[in-house]
Amino acid sequence: MSTTDQPPIAATAATPDTATPEFTAPTTTPPAGSSADRFMRRLLRLPEGRTATADEARSAFQKSLFISTCRCMLMYIIFPFVLPAVGIARGVGPYIGLTIGVLAMVSIVYSIRRFWRADHSKRWHYTVFGTVIIGFLIYLATKDISTILS
């Protein structure tokens, strides 16, 4: 048998043989993970399988961060100092703050879900970060509600 009758070694190594048990197709489901991972996936009501990419998770994070930044700029710079200085928007701060705060909380939960769907390596870090921010937003929402009701 000559060397020309045998396929080149590189060609056999580069093409996987789907009939052999060593080859497995890539899966779209995230790894099973710990019981805490499984709990978070159930809590966030995520569908089975990976449905988001790391880029989508990053995009959701950037959007939620932008909304939170806008809320902080409005509530701590524009409403208390700029608008009263020009004589407008007295007393509307709590209403707008409450609306933007709720929007920010929804956005943060949305981005946390994206991190978990993508099985992002920093999903736990962002979950803790997002939960702390949501806690602050809930505190501010209660202050806004008490201001509105008083």
Image (cartoon, rainbow, N blue to C red):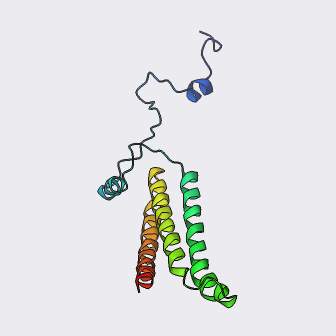
Say which residue appears at 54% left-offset and 74% top-offset. Answer: 96
Mark yes or no: residue 121 visible.
no
Tell me: residue 143, above or below residue 46.
below
Quadrant for the N terminus in the image: top right
Residue 118 lies, with reference to residue 150, above or below; the image says: above
Asked if residue 29 lies left or right of residue 87, the reply is left
Relative to the observer, which residue lies in front, 132 or 105?
105
Foreground of the two, 67 or 48: 67
Position of residue 59 measured from the top left corner of the image (x, y, whole percent) = 59, 57
- x, y percent for residue 16: 52, 27
Residue in the foreground of this view, choosing between 35 and 90: 90
Badge count: 0
Residue 23, quarter of picture: top left
Q: Quadrant of the C terminus?
A: bottom left
Q: Where is residue 105 in the image (x, y as percent from the top left)?
A: 46, 67
Q: Residue furthest bottom?
A: 85
Asked if one can make out residue 112 in the rendered structure from this viewpoint, the answer is yes
Q: Residue drawn 46% across and 32% down?
A: 25
Residue pictured at 44% horizontal, 32% vertical: 24
Which image quarter: residue 62?
bottom right
Residue located at (55% from left, 58% from top): 60
